Image (spheres, helix red, strand yellow):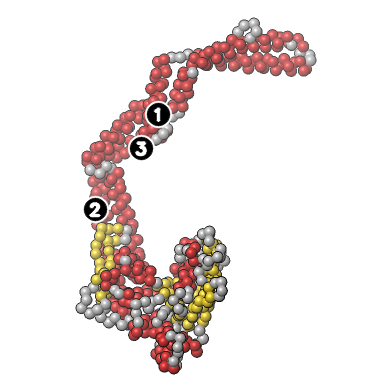
């Protein structure tokens, strides 16, 4: 249960800490005092979407801490699956005006998504937003499946696996080209692509070799002239570099007895050999750079072909060769497509029959649970004073999906003689509040959360109906901790603990505070809820009688 909630710089709240107890905890206060802000802060620390507008004006950050103790076995199991084995859970969340968030669970950093999962394991809530969600047909199947529990969950896994297999077969059939016309079109295209690539006889590394040779031929005249000039300077004529180096080496040859001179002679001889090697290399280059127009035209066409193929089939010769191998495989598959298609069509029919059968099994499980949930909700509604109400879970079929074939819609009638209609079309505000309470009462039985929040559950109801709602929530509080905002004294009369939220102003600011009401003062607050601030003996006596009727006073 929620033991302590600490709030700092959230809307009207400067710094607030409140301890809650087990049982039925009621929050009272004038409209605008800040009751809902306390629940907004709690939802924030439980992982709700961060909203910077909640930060108190003039402050740089807000922070909320919540401590949960006395965890149930079911709650412990869920938290253990999330990696938390402690006997109590401390949640802490901070948000700055810059949008930076900091989340800690038991003093260890955590993500907002993990916080949301942990929060869902600890607390379940009812709000006006949830009543809107209840009206949406798309949510009804999920609610039914949650009620049905593990048996439906296991069967959904079976359906999901078969649907995945069925989808895979459909994709394989489509990959073979669909109908005969489409397969023939695909076969012709693939054959053309294979022929075009294989006729080109591409070789790995060829594109670079062709590009380099074309570059050489494109610059043949410049290369020939430059190399010829260099050869003349290095090796031709009496003053050539080679001739000069030879004479220099000869001039020093008879002085080998002198180490330094011999070293110089050897270095000059080495240079002579290097220059002679350069001359030979230049000669080879000159012979290769002789322009051949036929060779140039052939290489130019080859280069264009390589560029065209690489542009169409992958960007490089390596990728073009990989493409053609893949195309051959596809072409081979198409050649055998009649056999493969026949085999796949038979397999598809078998898997589809299995899928439909397992969807029917899933439907039967859901319908069985639907009967159970119908009976439970009707029983709850009768206890809430709606003795003539009707409730049915309507089933219709759709094409098989990962979730089966069922479309589910909740239908409701509050009055005798009135036919059931979609929940959104027939339930008034008060009826919807009671219906939601019935749903929460049922789902609390199968849930693990130990704290249940009701934000203005009494919206749209009054009088004796309020007394029934209070009685029902009180019954729930025997199993889970209840935190409830209410404006009805009939509901508040059942409180085990009553808190009053007030708003205080001074010359510069406004802030919210919360106070636990002493047991001997609860009747006075109930009387004020009935007649206002001008208490009378009669109103006090009426409040005492309400507490006695609720079983909270002797």
Circle 3: element type: helix
Vertical side of 154 occupied by 339: above or below: above
Q: Nearer the viewer, mark 1 or mark 2?
A: 1
The answer to whether the residue labelled 1 contacts the one labelled 3, judged by CB atoms less than 8 Å apart, is no
Tell me what residue is drawn at x 33 percent, y 77 percent: 430
Which of disc 2 and disc 1 is earlier in sequence? 1
Circle 2: element type: helix
Alpha carbon of mark 2 to alpha carbon of mark 3: how far?
29 Å
User: What is the crowding at mark 1: few (fewer than 14 residues within 10 Å), some, or many (at least 20)?
Assistant: some
Residues 223 and 146: in front is: 223
Which residue is farthest left?
417
Residue that badge 1 annotates: 307
Which of disc 3 and disc 2 is earlier in sequence? 3
Q: Is residue 25 left or right of residue 393?
A: right
Residue that badge 3 annotates: 326
The image quarter containing residue 369 is: bottom left
Q: Nearer the viewer, mark 1 or mark 3?
A: 1
Circle 1: element type: helix
């Amino acid at each position: 249960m929620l033991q302590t909630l600490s709030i700092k710089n959230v809307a009207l709240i400067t710094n607030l800490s409140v301890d809650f107890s087990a049982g039925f905890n009621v929050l009272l206060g004038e409209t605008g005092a800040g009751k809902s802000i306390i629940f907004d802060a709690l939802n924030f620390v439980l992982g709700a979407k961060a909203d910077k507008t909640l930060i108190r004006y003039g402050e740089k950050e807000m922070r909320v801490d919540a401590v949960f103790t006395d965890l149930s076995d079911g709650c412990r199991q869920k938290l253990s699956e999330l990696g938390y084995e402690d006997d109590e859970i401390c949640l802490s969340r901070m948000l700055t005006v810059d949008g930076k968030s900091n989340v800690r669970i038991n003093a260890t950093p955590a993500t907002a998504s993990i916080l949301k999962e942990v929060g869902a394991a600890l607390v379940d809530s009812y709000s006006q937003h949830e009543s809107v969600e209840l009206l949406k047909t798309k949510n009804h199947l999920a609610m039914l499946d949650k009620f049905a529990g593990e048996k439906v969950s296991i069967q959904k896994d079976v359906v999901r696996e078969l649907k995945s297999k069925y989808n895979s077969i459909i994709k394989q059939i489509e990959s073979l080209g669909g109908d005969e016309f489409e397969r023939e079109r695909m076969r012709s295209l693939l054959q053309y692509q294979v022929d075009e690539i294989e006729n080109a006889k591409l070789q790995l590394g060829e594109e670079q070799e062709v590009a380099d040779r074309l570059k050489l031929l494109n610059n043949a005249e410049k290369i020939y002239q430059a190399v010829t000039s260099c050869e003349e300077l290095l090796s031709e004529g009496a003053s050539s570099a080679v001739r000069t180096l030879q004479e220099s080496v000869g001039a020093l040859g008879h002085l080998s007895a002198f180490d330094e001179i011999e070293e110089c002679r050897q270095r000059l001889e080495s240079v002579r050999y290097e220059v002679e090697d350069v001359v030979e290399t230049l000669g080879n280059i000159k012979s290769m750079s002789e322009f051949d127009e036929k060779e140039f035209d052939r290489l130019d066409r080859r280069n264009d072909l390589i560029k065209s193929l690489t542009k169409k089939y992958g960007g490089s010769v390596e990728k073009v060769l990989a493409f053609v191998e893949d195309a051959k495989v596809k072409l081979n598959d198409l050649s055998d497509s009649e056999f493969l298609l026949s085999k796949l069509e038979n397999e598809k029919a078998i898997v589809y029959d299995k899928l439909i059968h397992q969807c029917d099994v899933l439907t039967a499980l859901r319908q069985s649970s639907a009967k159970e949930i119908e009976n439970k909700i009707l029983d709850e509604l009768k206890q809430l004073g709606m003795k003539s109400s009707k409730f049915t879970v309507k089933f219709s079929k759709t094409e098989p999906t990962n979730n089966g074939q069922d479309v589910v819609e909740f239908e409701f009638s509050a009055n005798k003689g009135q036919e059931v209609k979609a929940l959104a079309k027939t339930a008034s505000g008060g009826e919807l509040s009671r219906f939601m309470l019935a749903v929460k009462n049922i789902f609390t039985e199968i849930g693990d959360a130990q704290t249940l929040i009701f934000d203005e559950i009494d919206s749209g109801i009054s009088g004796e109906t309020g007394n029934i709602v209070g009685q029902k929530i009180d019954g729930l509080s025997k199993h889970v901790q209840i935190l409830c905002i209410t404006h009805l004294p009939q509901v508040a009369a059942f409180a085990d603990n009553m808190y009053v939220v007030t708003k205080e102003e001074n010359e510069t600011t406004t802030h919210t505070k919360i106070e636990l009401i002493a047991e001997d003062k609860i009747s006075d607050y109930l009387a004020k809820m009935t007649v206002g601030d001008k208490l009378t003996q009669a109103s006090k006596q009426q409040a005492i009688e309400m507490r006695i009727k609720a079983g909270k006073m002797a």
